[in-house]
Image: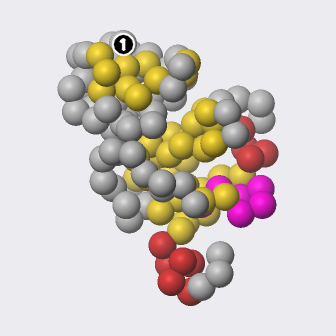
Amino acid sequence: MNSSQEAQIWVPVASFADFRGQRQIVCSVGDLQLLLLRVGPEVIAVQDGCTHLGESLYGGRLMGGHITCPFHGACFDVATGEAVSGPAVAPLRRFRVQIDGDQIFVDVRNRANGPLSHS
């Protein structure tokens, strides 16, 4: 992090070692539950709660840029957060991710839906 302003926005949430060969990890920042996904060389952060009934998405099938809720089968595009199949219709919240060495930081103040640029 280069400036004190960035230090106030970007919160350290995990390291690459936390994945331990997995493609998904769950972390918390206060009352916010996040699901971090490794998609190729990229890390994507989304809310860890299906927009259908709020169940955790952890352990859901992650394939072809989509994650499927392990409870009722709702499917989301991880690049946009869009619900691509029901029963969910509302998109997932996405959060900007920044990598510094092995550490993964998330901008938890950004709770907008839709595609986000990664720094």
Q: Nearer the viewer, residue 49 or 43?
A: 43
Q: Residue 41 location, x and y as percent?
A: 70, 40
Residue drawn at x 56%, y 86% as measured from the top left? 4
Question: Which quarter of the figure has residue 63?
Answer: top right
Tell me, yes or no, whether the highlighted magenta stretch contains residue 92.
no
- Residue linked to disc 1: 73
Disc 1 crowd rating (10 Å Cα; few below 14, some 14-19, many 20+) is: some
The quadrant in which residue 90 appears is: top left
Which region shows up in magenta? 100-105
| Left-right relation of 65 to 38 | left
* x, y percent for residue 54: 30, 32
Residue 9 relative to residue 115: left or right: right
Amino acid beneath label 1: Gly
Magenta region includes residue 102: yes
User: Which quadrant of the figure contains the C terminus?
Assistant: bottom right
Q: Is residue 76 visible?
A: yes
Q: In which quadrant is the N terminus drawn?
A: bottom right
Left or right of 100 on screen, residue 37:
left
Please name the residue shown 47% across and 23% down the image. Answer: 66
